Image: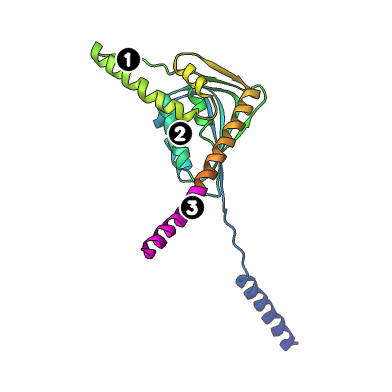
């Protein structure tokens, strides 16, 4: 009886040891982060935590920008655009109501897009307040106009036609309902895909061209 009891205890010890040897561990391999761009887009300093998360997200992560905004700070929208471009994550932009003015800059900086029924977009020329001496104000206005128009053309390329871009920077407002946003976004995405495909082909062709040059050099 004593021997049997010891054998059973030994078996329990072996089972416990095996349990420890075959322990399993879990850890996340990806994160999904959701940000709500709502109301007025404020000064950039209020979004530093967002910028840090977006900029340092991994290639398996998903960033979702939920947009329902009347617009706001142009410079903040520009920083969003920069941060989103640097992120390795897939960035999904979803319009859930209004996507006006600066908010449209954020929307068009995404990788994939969702547009809720009844949503709208407003695209217009910039607004600002300038103060100081007359000559200073003139120089600032001239600088801002050239700088902002250049960025505007890049942001809305493929979403607006060249003529529409010219109309907007000349002062004409452009409104889009949900159907127009979807249609324009699809065309823009297709244009981006073609450009990316052409770029990849160019990169792949480069080594071939270099090899041809080396071959010609050896022949000489």
The numbered dot on residue 1 is none
Can residue 117 be spotted in the picture? yes
- Residue that mark 3 sits on: 205
SS category of the residue bearing label 2: helix
Front-most of 63 and 192? 192
Query: What range of the chain is rendered magenta?
Result: 201-220
Assign a secondary structure to mark 3: helix
Image depth: mark 3 or mark 1 in front: 3
| Residue 214 highlighted magenta (yes or no) | yes
Q: Is residue 145 magenta?
A: no
Q: Between 2 and 51, which is closer to the camera in this rendering?
A: 51
User: Which quadrant of the view contains residue 130?
Assistant: top left
Residue 185 on image: x %, y %? 59, 30
Which residue is drawn at the image coordinates 39% and 31% (left, top)?
A: 45
Q: Nearer the viewer, residue 53 or 190?
A: 190
**Above or below for 165 versus 108:** above
Q: Tag 1 or tag 2, which sits nearer the N-term?
A: 2
Q: How is the image coloured?
A: rainbow
Label 1 SS: loop
Give the image quarter of residue 184: top right
Mark 2–mark 1 Cα distance, whole angstroms, equals 24 Å
| Residue designated by label 1 | 130
Image coordinates of residue 34 in percent, x first then y, are 56, 37
Q: CA distance from mark 2 to mark 3?
A: 34 Å
The first of marks 2 and 3 along the sequence is: 2
Point out which mark residue 80 bears: 2
- First of labels 3, 1 by sequence position: 1
Question: Is residue 58 at least partly visible in the picture?
Answer: no
Q: Quadrant of residue 11?
A: bottom right
Quadrant (top left, top right, bottom left, bottom right) of the N terminus:
bottom right
Front residue of 101/57: it is 101
């Amino acid at each position: 009886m004593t021997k049997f009891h010891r054998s059973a205890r030994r078996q329990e010890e072996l089972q416990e040891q095996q349990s420890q040897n075959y322990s399993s561990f879990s850890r996340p391999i990806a994160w999904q982060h959701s940000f709500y761009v709502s109301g007025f887009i404020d000064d950039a300093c209020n979004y530093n935590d967002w910028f840090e998360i977006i900029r340092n997200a991994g290639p398996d992560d998903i960033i979702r920008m939920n947009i329902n905004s009347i617009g706001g700070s142009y410079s903040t929208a520009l920083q969003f655009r920069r941060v989103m471009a640097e992120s390795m994550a897939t960035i999904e932009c979803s319009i859930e109501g209004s996507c006006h003015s600066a908010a449209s800059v954020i929307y068009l900086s995404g990788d994939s897009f969702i547009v809720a029924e009844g949503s709208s977009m407003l695209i217009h020329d910039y607004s600002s307040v300038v103060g100081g001496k007359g000559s200073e104000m003139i120089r600032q206005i001239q600088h801002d106009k050239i700088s902002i128009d250049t960025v505007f053309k890049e942001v809305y390329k493929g979403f607006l036609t060249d003529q529409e871009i010219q109309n907007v920077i000349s002062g004409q407002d452009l409104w889009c309902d949900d159907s127009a946003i979807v249609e324009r976004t699809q065309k823009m995405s297709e244009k981006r895909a073609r450009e990316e495909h052409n770029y990849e082909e160019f990169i792949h062709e480069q080594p071939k061209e270099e090899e041809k040059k080396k071959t010609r050099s050896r022949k000489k």
